[in-house]
Image (cartoon, rainbow, N blue to C red):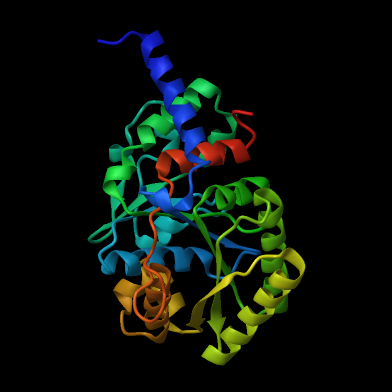
Amino acid sequence: MPDVGTRKGDQAKDLRRIVDMQRRPAGRLTGLRSLAVLSGKGGVGKSNISVNLSLAMAGRGKRVVLLDADLGMANVDLLCGLSPRFNLAHVIRGQKQVRDILLPLGENLSVLPGGPGVRELADLDEEALLNLIDSMSILEGLADVLVIDTGAGIHRNTISFGAASDAVLLVTTPEPTSIRDAYGVLKALVSATAGKTEVTVVVNMAASPEEGEDVADRIRSAASQFLGISPAFGGTVLRDETVPLSVKRRTPLLSAYPDSDASRCIRAVAGKILGLGGEQEPLPPGKGVKSFFFRLARGLGLGQ
């Protein structure tokens, strides 16, 4: 049985390997892909998009883990009708393994409850961080995509999740304040990543596909002109009366109303993200779960 010193040495070597991974050309990526779902303000349907997009990707054959990382209003469990007994905090404290807290939600999809563990990430020392990264590495063999439902706004913790991810899905609505705040998130992401951010804009609760495209074009144009980035357009999700009905039923929209307009829109967004059909490139692999948590720790001010 290896002693504690040997284990710490192995962890430090692993951490150095992850640092080296940041410098590799993108073409060599082979790991799990992380996708953070952000919004400029609350009430735009971000968590609903996170849940149902995860279901849609799972329906396309991708193995997905959905991490509920919303510090203020963690509600993925409510939207899915789940009652988690354990969360990320139990893993951080060494009380549970990752497998113990994963909750299955249909074929190919599991929910990873964040709970107070998301807040505790910011207080980890180096050894605890290494232990967490080591324990989370099991996700590499369980999933192809890690979807992170973050908090709304430009709080440092929220932007850190976006900056640590391989890609960001930015959710807005046609409401002027939502558009303004979504642009604010883009500014914060550019500042945190020096412009090296892969962003896709999705317009939720639109009255028509044309309205959604117009809103996205305004955000993309401003981002290109003033921030030097070119967000992609992931699609429009139409306003649909079945969405609040599914929330009341505590059942994901795609399960409760699979033939609704909004469900069809979300499946189309999933197809775009996965690069299915048309001239889109297939979904590339990511930098892996260890790299994600290392970058997240750096964004939260750890390991400097």
In front of the other: 255 or 159: 159
Seen as rendered, the residue at the extreme right is: 226
Is 110 positioned to the left or the right of 198 in the image? left
Is 192 positioned to the left or the right of 256 in the image? right
Q: Is residue 116 visible?
A: no
Number of numbered labels in the structure image = 0
Instruction: From the top left corner, tell me how far across and down residue 194 is, in percent.
Output: 68, 51
Is 5 positioned to the left or the right of 212 in the image? left
Q: Is residue 275 visible?
A: yes
Instruction: From the top left corner, tell me how far across and down residue 34 is, in percent.
Output: 44, 53
Instruction: From the top left corner, tell me how far across and down residue 224 is, in percent.
Output: 70, 71
Seen as rendered, the residue at the extreme left is: 107
The quadrant in which the C terminus is found is top right
Q: Identify the residue shown where x is 49% and y is 27%.
A: 16
Rendering quarter of residue 106: bottom left
In front of the other: 151 or 125: 125
Residue 268, placed above or below residue 119: below
Q: Identify the residue shown where x is 49% and y is 53%.
A: 166
Instruction: From the top left corner, tell me how far across and down residue 286 is, in percent.
Output: 42, 52
Residue 272, placed above or below residue 185: below
In front of the other: 11 or 107: 11
In front of the other: 198 or 57: 198
The quadrant in which the N terminus is found is top left
Is 207 positioned to the left or the right of 269 in the image? right
Residue 49, placed above or below residue 159: below
Q: Identify the residue shown where x is 27% and y is 47%.
A: 142
